[in-house]
Amino acid sequence: MCVSDSPAPLSVTERAALADLLVELGPDAPTCCAGWTTADLAAHLVIRDRRPDTAPGAVLGGPLGRWTDRVLARTRDRTPWPHLVDQLRAGPPVFVPTAWGPVDRLVNGAEMTIHHEDVRRAQADWAPRELPRAAQDFLWDQVDFLARTRPRSDRGLQVRRTDTGATQVLREGSPVTTVAGEPLEVLLWVSGREDAARVEVS
């Protein structure tokens, strides 16, 4: 029998670390998501895993968004906190496409990492952590996709890794804004968490 020694993907390790942190903090701790407590964030991730019907509203807003908000609120209010965290830790059920390993890695790696940081960085005693190079490389590959969720603009935008010097042009235009930092920090910035990200903007 051959046993792989490759590291577990971020979708697995960050989900587990986030669940552990939620157990420690409880349902009423702050997060970097405006207006959300840890209970709101946990419910968001649980319905993302288990209620595909809420996905369009999470992206498009409007009437669909109101449906997503109602499902989130019901899940948060009607699910005991330990069970809510257990559902998050367990991940999507087997009949949901994101339960399949390659899909899980693709759609949940950055999501779990970002939300883990949303909780970590909202606490008074948080400190930066060092991620393995493979994890940083994965997050760097997600930057372009996350940048597409930013508001449209005529200004140019490029990002630079401070650990390797690699750059990506995310949007053509003039003048050009350059965001420099480690991939995790750049990813947080392009996903709308400018106040939480440790980057240099020029």
Image (tube, grey):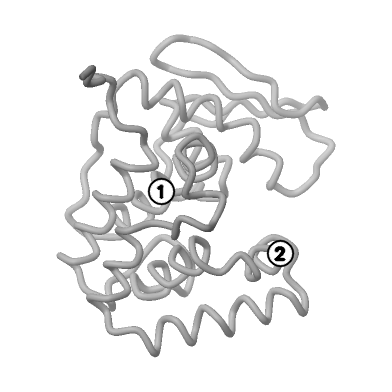
The structure residue drawn at horizontal position 44% and vertical position 58%, both measured from the top left corner, is 92
The structure residue drawn at horizontal position 64% and vertical position 63%, both measured from the top left corner, is 55
The answer to whether marks 1 and 2 mark residues whose Cβ atoms lie closer than 8 Å is no
Binning the other alpha carbons within 10 Å of mark 2 as few (below 14), some (14 to 19) or many (20 upward) gives some
Q: Which mark is residue 135?
A: none
Q: Secondary structure at mark 2?
A: helix
Placement of 30 over or under 126, stated as above or below: below
Binning the other alpha carbons within 10 Å of mark 1 as few (below 14), some (14 to 19) or many (20 upward) gives many
In the rendered image, the quadrant that contains the C terminus is top right
Which residue, given by chain and number where applicable, does mark 1 sit on?
112
Left or right: where does residue 10 sit relative to residue 74?
A: left
Q: What amino acid is found at the position of numbered circle 1 in the picture?
A: Met
Q: Position of residue 131 (x, y in %)?
A: 28, 28
Number of marks present in the image shown: 2
Q: What amino acid is found at the position of numbered circle 2 in the picture?
A: Pro
Placement of 64 over or under 156, stated as above or below: below
Q: Quadrant of residue 21?
A: bottom left
> Which numbered disc, 1 or 2, marks the residue that appears first in the sequence?
2
Q: Position of residue 99 (x, y in %)?
A: 47, 49
In the rendered image, the quadrant that contains the N terminus is top left
Of residues 26 and 72, the one drawn nearer to the viewer in this rendering: 72
Left or right: where does residue 85 sit relative to residue 46?
A: left
Of residues 7 and 200, the one drawn nearer to the viewer in this rendering: 7
Placement of 171 over or under 74, stated as above or below: above
Q: Which mark is residue 56?
A: 2
Q: Quadrant of residue 173?
A: top right
Left or right: where does residue 15 sit relative to residue 109?
A: left
Of residues 126 and 3, the one drawn nearer to the viewer in this rendering: 3
Q: Position of residue 177 (x, y in %)?
A: 66, 29
Q: Quadrant of residue 162?
A: top left
The structure residue drawn at horizontal position 25% and vertical position 29%, both measured from the top left corner, is 130
